[in-house]
């Protein structure tokens, strides 16, 4: 399973907004050592999936659309990366016709399911409370 750098940055942006509600893109970028344009692109994807809200007004702030109990790591990762996958044989079985007899295929499926289950059960509230490793 591979999580992109963009997904990593998206998690950082969401964490930042939990710690600093209604922040401007430039503020988030400064705190996270990212470029403002990159934070802008990430925030557009997160807003499109309903994780963030672009709050207009004098300051033009970003805010979270829901609370830390309602957003999981999987939500944020899939908002920017699309569906989680382990390898091309799990994503596109037509590329590899060995799944019927490949001993690794079943393990790959199990790893994918375990990883997705952990990401989908890890909320930002549990991250902020230090409970994510349990």
Image (cartoon, rainbow, N blue to C red):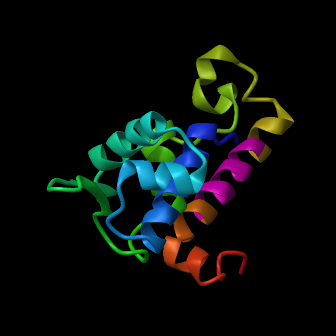
Q: Name the spot of residue 82 as percent of width and height, x first.
A: 47, 38
Question: In the picture provided, is 38 more to the left or to the right than 84?
Answer: left
Residue 58 in the image: above or below residue 134: above
Quadrant assignment for the N terminus: top right
Residue 70 on the magenta segment: no
Outermost residue, right side:
103
Outermost residue, left side:
57
Say which of 121 and 106 sits in front. 121
Residue 21 in the image: above or below residue 113: below
Q: Name the spot of residue 51 as percent of width and height, x first.
A: 34, 57
Give the mark count: 0
Q: Is residue 11 visible?
A: no
Q: Name the spot of residue 31 as percent of width and height, x first.
A: 55, 57
Q: Measuring 73% from the left and 29% from the top, which residue is drawn there?
A: 100
Q: Measuring 48% from the left and 73% from the top, which residue is drawn there?
A: 19
Q: Name the spot of residue 64 as percent of width and height, x first.
A: 33, 64
Q: Is residue 69 visible?
A: yes
Q: Measuring 56% from the left and 44% from the top, which residue is drawn there?
A: 7
Q: Which residues are magenta?
A: 108-117
Question: In the picture provided, is 96 more to the left or to the right than 77?
Answer: right
Query: Which is the main secondary structure of the residues drawn in magenta?
Result: helix
Residue 114 on the magenta segment: yes
Question: In the picture provided, is 130 more to the left or to the right than 15?
Answer: right
Question: In the picture provided, is 102 more to the left or to the right than 61?
Answer: right
Quadrant assignment for the C terminus: bottom right
Q: Quadrant of residue 6?
A: top right
Say which of 50 and 97 sits in front. 50
């Amino acid at each position: 399973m591979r999580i992109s750098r963009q997904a990593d940055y998206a998690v950082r942006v969401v964490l930042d907004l939990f710690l600093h509600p209604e922040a401007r893109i430039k503020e988030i970028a400064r705190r996270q050592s990212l470029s403002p344009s990159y934070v802008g692109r990430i925030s557009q994807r997160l807003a499109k999936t309903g994780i963030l809200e672009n709050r207009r007004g004098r300051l033009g702030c970003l805010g979270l659309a829901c609370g830390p109990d309602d957003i999981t790591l999987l939500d944020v990762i899939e908002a920017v990366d699309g569906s989680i996958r382990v390898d091309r044989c799990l994503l596109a079985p037509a590329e590899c016709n060995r799944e019927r007899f490949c001993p690794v295929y079943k393990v790959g499926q199990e790893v994918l399911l375990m990883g997705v289950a952990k990401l989908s059960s890890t909320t930002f509230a549990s991250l902020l409370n230090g409970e994510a490793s349990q």
